Image (cartoon, rainbow, N blue to C red):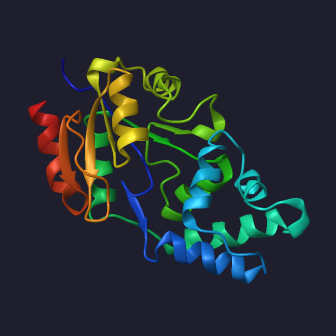
Amino acid sequence: MDTVGVAFDLDDTLAVTRVDRATLLTEALGEVGAPQRSREAYLQAHAEHLTARSRKPVFERLFNDAENVDAAAVTRAYRDRVNAALEPVPGAESTLTALRDRYRLGLLTNGPVVAQRSKLDALGWADAFDVTLVTGELAAGKPDPAAFESLLAELGTDADETVFVGNDVTADIQGAVTAGIDAVQVCYPSGPPHDPNALAHIERDELAAGLPTVLANR
């Protein structure tokens, strides 16, 4: 089956932060005088709120009422720091432009609506895709097959004519494969090991050069 649609994850696939996320979290909590929490604790709370409108419920989950933390202030501080540090991976923008001439181009990103949409604005990518889906706007997040079914419905493509590109083994690779979609794993030194279920594995800094070849040879 020829490839008709190509869709991407956002964070750590197409864009990264110049400063690691753990440091950004530490700085944001310190800015508003909130108790420190680990990046791991944040990610656990984040995973429980993939369909939220903002990160506020995430930070409410991190702190109990007795700590009297202004979750809205933490949300703003962290969002501002992440967006200021965000940058495309090498060649991402030219790759998206070139692929959009040949394929239906999509984005499916896990996270609250405000957080993820603001990242796209910060990158100048609000209109970079034919279809942009944030799980905060959906009934389920990745790896739930329903999230990928929503993607296919919006792209107007079948699973077997679509490729999904992402870095997270569970959310992106296993999620896409379970939905019947070929997945390309984006790899990097600190990332997870290669998933044998992926159609192909591409180093993140080589995405611009490697992905078009994978798609052409599929």
**Which quarter of the rendering shows the C terminus?**
top left
The residue at the point 59 percent across, 30 percent down is 140
The residue at the point 38 percent across, 47 percent down is 168
- Residue 57 lies, in percent from the top left, at 76, 51
Q: Is residue 169 left or right of residue 215?
A: right
17 and 124: which one is in front? Answer: 17
Q: Is residue 104 left or right of residue 69?
A: left
| Res. 199 image quadrant | top left
| Res. 214 image quadrant | top left
Q: Is residue 159 above or below residue 68?
A: above
- Residue 18 lies, in percent from the top left, at 43, 76
Q: Residue furthest left?
A: 217
The residue at the point 25 percent across, 51 percent down is 193
Q: How many marks?
A: 0
- Residue 124 lies, in percent from the top left, at 49, 60
Q: Is residue 119 above or below residue 87?
A: above
Q: Is residue 167 left or right of residue 184?
A: right
Q: Is residue 52 left or right of residue 218?
A: right
**Which quarter of the rendering shows the N terminus?**
top left
The residue at the point 27 percent across, 19 percent down is 160
122 and 170: which one is in front? Answer: 170
| Res. 72 image quadrant | bottom right
